[in-house]
Image: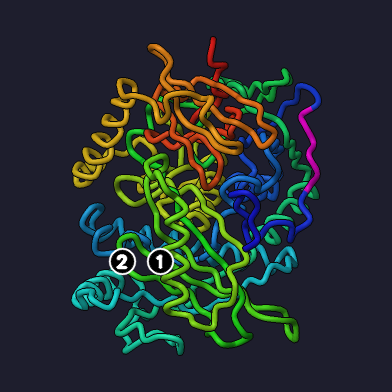
Amino acid sequence: MNTDSGATISAWAATAELPEPSPLPTDVAADVCVVGAGISGLTTAYLLAREGRSVVVLDDGPVAGGETSRTTAHLSNAIDDRYYWLERIHGEEETRIATESQTAEIDRIESVVREEGISCDFERLDGYLFNPREGRQEDLQKELEAARRAGLTETELISRAPLDPFDTGPCLRFPRQGQFHPLLYLAGVVKAIRRDGGRIFTATHAEKIEAGSPARVVSRAGPVVSAAAVVVATNSPVHTLVALHTKQAAYRSYVVAGYVPRSSVRKGLYWDTESPYHYVRLQAAPEGEGDDLLIVGGEDHKTGQEEEPEKRWKRLMEWARERFPALKEVSFRWSGQVMETVDGLAFIGKSPGEENVYVATGDSGMGMTHRTIAGILLTDLLLGRENRWSRLYDPSRVSLRAAGEFAKENLNVAAQYLDHVTSGETDSAQDLRRGSGAVVRRGLKKIAAYRDENGTLHERSAVCTHLGCVVAWNPAEKSWDCPCHGSRFDPEGRVLNGPAIRNLPNAED
């Protein structure tokens, strides 16, 4: 397996020419400052630059170095949470609007690929939703009827998915879905942004985001971006403590990828309805070159709430090998952060209570889809154009029919604060092996202790800098993960994922 000491490697890694790090050198002004250089931020910047607006993009990592590089790149209008559930929460008309936006997202990516001449393996293909072997087939019929009411009139129930290795049983076929190579796509988008005058600065940490007129983004190194509007497109918002975090929850989703003989698996998008669920696609080898890459994902769990994440990859590999016996050695494995909203749709629009600050978050398991919708919708909002999707995705919305999901997720969060009064995971940091970490109680404090491969002990506070939960050690990815709202830190306490924006402090501070 292409891993090293627990490290995880995405199949997309090192396969696209993305910009070298380029920190913000001095104060600048722009019409719009976008924080986050993933697909939502770059799509927004691309569309605004095409409209003649001056745009600055900031990211503390490389372009597409966050969750965009960890996607499996399904482009789909087959709602991850099921159409019949979405219809119950939002009603029939709003579900039709959601379907319209999901379909428009695939069309927009296709048009960008064509207009910009981007070679990124984009293609249209069918998607197939099937039950596990013991699943209730009436659920498929219910989903078929809801999908057709939502406008997907060509969706059909067929006897099985076109997979020779195993029989899925009855399934739904969703025509005209899509897939692509996400980093190759964004490499082309970046070139277009720069061609149209947009500026992209990486290795630039946004320390503070200030609403107002103008709005301001203050970098950790000092330089400031002043703009008529700021878009926060950081997967999980880093500019607000509470407003959106009670309405969504962070989950880790796992992926394994390995080679299969060319053309042994038919191209398509495949999803099952198990809990936890699984999703499959094929990245075909170039004509005349080697094997195809089979990409299998799933086995989700709440971030920071799995003591043995390695078992998730193991179960995923077992599931894949049972159904695809031609699968060779697994060559890549990785995981990504999914923000699940309580009502199944993203939050895109004006940040609640903040002047000239906009937000895109809540991918709900459909990251590429919702993130491209964000670019389309935010561009219209920033240019003062009407968009009939705006109410559906409004970050201020309250979904009364999703009250049960809201209560369940927030009770789960409340339970995590009890970790402050529990004992540590080990009695002493001196017991730690090289390359391992654990939470240690020292008096009234919880310490995140990590011993690196050289034997040096690193100790940070184990209290997340977002809202004070105690972080948990993730041995599979060597990170400190917050079980409340999904913040993640590297072994030495540096922020990897929001909503935390500050590193874990020294243990003695």
- x, y (%) of residue 204? 70, 30
Is residue 160 positioned above or below 37 on the image?
A: below
Q: Quadrant of the N terminus?
A: bottom right
Q: Quadrant of the C terminus?
A: top right
Is residue 78 positioned above or below 459 on the image?
A: below
Residue positioned 52% across, 53% down in the render = 335
Amino acid of disc 1: His
Residue assigned mark 1? 278
**Nearer to me, 261 or 108:** 261
**Nearer to me, 461 or 267:** 461
Residue positioned 75% across, 53% down in the render = 192
Q: 10 Å neighbourhood of mark 2: few (<14), some, or many (≥20)? A: some
Magenta segment: does it hold 23?
Answer: yes
- x, y (%) of residue 182? 63, 60
How many numbered discs, if any? 2
- x, y (%) of residue 349? 46, 40
Where are the magenta residues, as a range? 19-24
Residue positioned 69% across, 25% down in the render = 225
Q: Which label is found at residue 274?
A: 2
Q: Is residue 230 visible?
A: no
- x, y (%) of residue 488? 51, 35
Q: Is residue 504 visible?
A: yes
Q: 10 Å neighbourhood of mark 1: few (<14), some, or many (≥20)? A: many
Helix, strand or loop at mark 1 = strand
Helix, strand or loop at mark 2 = loop
Is residue 403 positioned above or below 136 on the image?
A: above
Cα gap from disc 1 to disc 2, whole angstroms: 7 Å
Amino acid of disc 2: Glu
Magenta segment main secondary structure? loop
Tell me where residue 412 sits by quadrant. Answer: top left
